[in-house]
Amino acid sequence: MPQQTFFNLPDEKRQLILDLAIEEFAQHDYKNASISNLVARAGIAKGSFYQYFEDKRDLYLYLIQIAGEEKKRFLEQKSPPNPGMHLFDFLRWAMSEGARFEFSNPLLAQVAYRALFSDRPFGNDPFNQLQDMVMAYYLSLVQLGKSQGVIEGDLDDSLVVFLLSTIFNNFGKFVLESQKIAPTDLASGSVDYRSVNMDELAGQLIAILQRGLAPRN
Amino acid sequence: MPQQTFFNLPDEKRQLILDLAIEEFAQHDYKNASISNLVARAGIAKGSFYQYFEDKRDLYLYLIQIAGEEKKRFLEQKSPPNPGMHLFDFLRWAMSEGARFEFSNPLLAQVAYRALFSDRPFGNDPFNQLQDMVMAYYLSLVQLGKSQGVIEGDLDDSLVVFLLSTIFNNFGKFVLESQKIAPTDLASGSVDYRSVNMDELAGQLIAILQRGLAPRN
DNA sequence: ATTTAATATGACCGATCAGTCATATGACTG
DNA sequence: CAGTCATATGACTGATCGGTCATATTAAAT
């Protein structure tokens, strides 16, 4: 956690430092993110940075924490799902809103994506625990689906967890990328990015999963 | 490409350098992979390395090329699929054999994985082209599926490409992880990958996709 | 034995990095 | 004013990096 000094800073300056830090850690992985570059861009002295943060790791973990809090805040501000909701209705909601979060906070989401799926600068301990919790949550969803009779019971639990988590983790990037360019659409020319509707895409994707996972008759 | 000097080396020494290089670039991304560390481990002088390779990039691109050639060789040595094969039979074959390649060449596969999906050290130009070609190939498969009547025609092409490519790109890592096999164990040859039954998992996954993508009645 | 060419070597260079610290600045207190 | 304390500063350190180069070694050819 940052030192008190950091929180005593004028809001504007503090936010500038955070914004530039998020940009730095979004563009580079932990080891390649440069504190020297950050302080130069923020217009503060190296020494000042180390009055605000214990070290590079301190800043990084703080950014991860912010990302988690921001996503939580974002999802809670949306109409949260009914606990008794059907599994695939919940998944559709989570997929849409998760992607919407990546749209509204692309850099912060990128920092979190790196931390969760690519970049493990400190051993495996701190983040693997989080990762295990996420996987356990997916597992509980799969088991819920089986008990609701909407997922075929013979399917391997961990395989379905893999399928769901992989799709969910990358759906946001897919929508983002399909907005900038449509690399796959070589045949029919460019796509009108304004027309991209992520509820429609999430709906199609969930429908595919729902049919694919449905119990066989 | 390496200099002729590199190919004049005794086979054993040349292979040692390549093996250690693959390990280095499997464990670290391009920028963090250390030539200093490589030459120290290989027991050669820094200057010798730069007689073999123009620079770090030269080695890296050579490794990527090797990875492509090895995978091609691996797949061709297996009974190749019938061109008229049903789409999902082909996908099942590609998924199983792709994962098997990751089992038999875990470090090389990791280098390639990084290059294709995480690490873009040189602009976007050289690898985005390759990536676009891969995506175009997936797109052709999707269109084949639609023409074969095994993929619902109303589904968004790029969405299905995303679904298939994401699952295929990560299936190998899932199988590796679900067997709780560390990549280092595989590299040491202590695991017989042929005993792992990934056909069952690939079969379940393809069945899910096949049902999910099937035309709606 | 002598010359020539190929290869091996590691000290060295400039750049960059995370992190430190003595010192300076400024703001508030008495 | 003087004294105190939080904050700001950037030159500096030691480490590591990719890459270079003059020199040494070895092998081949004459």
Image: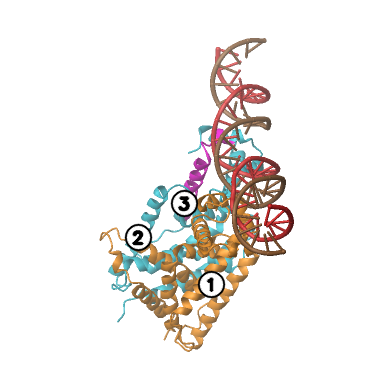
Chain colours: A orange, B cyan, C brown, D red
- CB within 8 Å, label 3 to label 2: no
Secondary element at image label 2: helix
Disc nearest the viewer among 3 and 2: 2
Residue at figure coordinates x 55%, y 55% from the top left: B105
Residue A42 % position (x, y): 51, 53
Specify few, some or many for label 2: CA neighbours under 10 Å numbering under 14, 14-19, or 20 or more: few
User: Which of A38 and B104 lies nearest the eye of the viewer?
Assistant: A38
Residue at figure coordinates x 61%, y 67% from the top left: A128
Residue type, mark 2 in image: Lys
User: Which of A1 and B144 lies nearest the eye of the viewer?
Assistant: A1
The numbered disc on residue A69 is 1
Q: Is residue B23 visible?
A: no
Subunit of label 1: A
Q: CA distance from mark 1 to mark 2?
A: 28 Å
Residue A195 lies, with reference to residue B83, above or below; the image says below
Quadrant into which the C terminus of chain A falls: bottom left
Lower position in the chain sequence, tag 1 or tag 2: 1
Q: Are marks 1 and 3 on the same chain?
A: no
User: Which of D5 and A129 lies nearest the eye of the viewer?
Assistant: D5
The numbered disc on residue B120 is 3
The numbered disc on residue A43 is none
- CB within 8 Å, label 1 to label 2: no
Residue type, mark 1 in image: Glu
- Answer left or right for B190 relative to A110: right
| Residues rendered magenta in the picture | B49-74
Disc nearest the viewer among 1 and 2: 1
Residue at figure coordinates x 62%, y 70% from the top left: A129
Residue bearing the label numbered 2? A180
